[in-house]
Image (cartoon, rainbow, N blue to C red):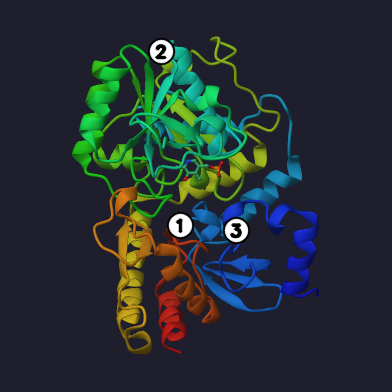
Amino acid sequence: MTTQNELFEKSKDLVPGGVHSPVRSFKGLHTTPRFIKKAHGAFIEDVDGKDYIDFCMSFGPLVLGHKDSDVEKSLVDALSRGWSYGTCEPYSLDLASFLLSKIDFVDQIRFVNSGTEAVMTALRLARGATKKDKIIKFNGCYHGHTDSMLIKAGSGLAGTSEASSAGVPEGISKDTLILELGNTEEVIQCFKDHPGEIAAIIIEPLPANNGLLIQEKSFLEFLRKITKDNDALLIFDEVISGFRVAFGGMAELTGITPDIVTYGKIIGGGLPVGAIAAKKEIMDNLAPVGSVYQAGTLSANPLAMVGGLETLKKMTPKAYEEINANTTKIINVFNKWLKEYNDGEFSHYSLTSHSSLFWIVAAEGVNCMDKIPADITEKFNPLFETLLEKGIYLSPNAYEVGFVSLAHNDEVIGELEKRLWN
Ligand SMILES: *Cc1c(COP(=O)(O)O)cnc(C)c1O
């Protein structure tokens, strides 16, 4: 078989930067992306035959581990029936009724193909329902790559914003207001500065895309109250946290009810799915009932629906206990090794974690972008390369979190210890 390095050379010719999503690119690292041939449980194997304990897990969806046998069986069954119908089918109803029976603050759900699509629809829905244009977004939260979410705080006056990507028109960036996580004063001021103009606040209730920036529950409660008081909607983007921190995500864990919730990642169990859910009176704004347009050729694809359902059925309360307990053990192992390795070469690191997510960072108490050390990438890269060499695969970027799955059991943790101290 072609080797890794040959594949990467070929890939760079065919695809920009050799990758289909920039976070896969190993930019700044002294090595090239691994080309994965196959995967099973907690392990991925590259085309050169080296295997790795995987803590990236496709950036979150694979909560059961790779190639779970029950999911595999249901996918093979589904495949034997056909893989796209472009009309109504029963499989999305199975998934919808399963979800809606367990998540009691929403009445209806619509399936799309990615987290980005879910957010894009949620924002249009919020604007359509409130007849207002402006959206508050927090610095450090990621909501996919739709134009209006690729916005950062402006470098000029306070309260201004500008695009964080080329190709996003100024006309779009002006309607996204960027504020700092945890700063209630800024939110209050923003509502004062834009009376009657703010359609919604969108937040990752557990920000996990620029490190793990855990927020106080009181901050989320404050956002719930100020949106209600100002006839604005609260959108929880639970694309990572949904079905991860608890079945009903951060909304269930905190008891705080958003007006609209977006899901992705785990909801498809590793197949391309996203979803928007809300009370019926809000969902009624979507076409064909209402005037907010949204559509998708492959939406509610039968394979993806079946894969998602089979994955979510296995996320019982006991499964959450198990995955969280596995994570605690893994964190203890990493922390011990970080202190001991090579006379303390990595002893400045510690792990921040929440449920089955962890973040390795050389600082403590980081809960907003301002507190992330400037040299985080420089410091992370040698650690990543050392672990890769030992057969341990983290997400290849200092700002990405680690994902634990149910497949990261005691046997895998034993293997992790062996590889770390080897
Ligand atoms: C991953 C992610 C998205 C984007 O989802 P894609 O499926 O990559 O488009 C949006 N919001 C959050 C919170 C995410 O973690």
Figure check: 71 above or below 192: below
The quarter of the displayed image where residue 15 is located: bottom right
Marks 3 and 2 close (CB-CB < 8 Å): no
As helix, strand or loop, the secondary structure at mark 2 comes to: helix
User: Residue 391, image x and y in percent?
Assistant: 54, 78
* Residue 183 drawn at (x, y percent): 24, 37
- Indicate if the residue with disc 3 has its beta carbon within 8 Å of ligand 1: no
Observer-nearest residue: 215 or 30? 30
Q: Amino acid at mark 3?
A: Arg
Image quadrant of residue 133? top left
Can the viewer see residue 286?
Answer: yes
Sequence-wise, the earlier of marks 3 and 2 is 3
Of callouts 2 and 1, the N-terminal one: 2
Q: Tell me the residue that label 1 is attached to.
A: 400
Q: CA distance from mark 3 to mark 2?
A: 38 Å
From the viewer's perspective, is residue 372 above or below residue 280? below
Question: Would the CB of label 1 be found within 8 Å of ligand 1?
Answer: no
**Rendered image: mark on residue 24:** 3
Residue identified by numbered label 2: 130
What residue do we see at 54% from left, 26% from top?
170
Helix, strand, or loop for circle 1? loop
Instruction: Name the residue located 35 percent from the left edge and 75 percent from the top edge.
Output: 334
| x then y, percent, for residue 316 | 38, 50
Identify the image quadrant of the N terminus.
Answer: bottom right
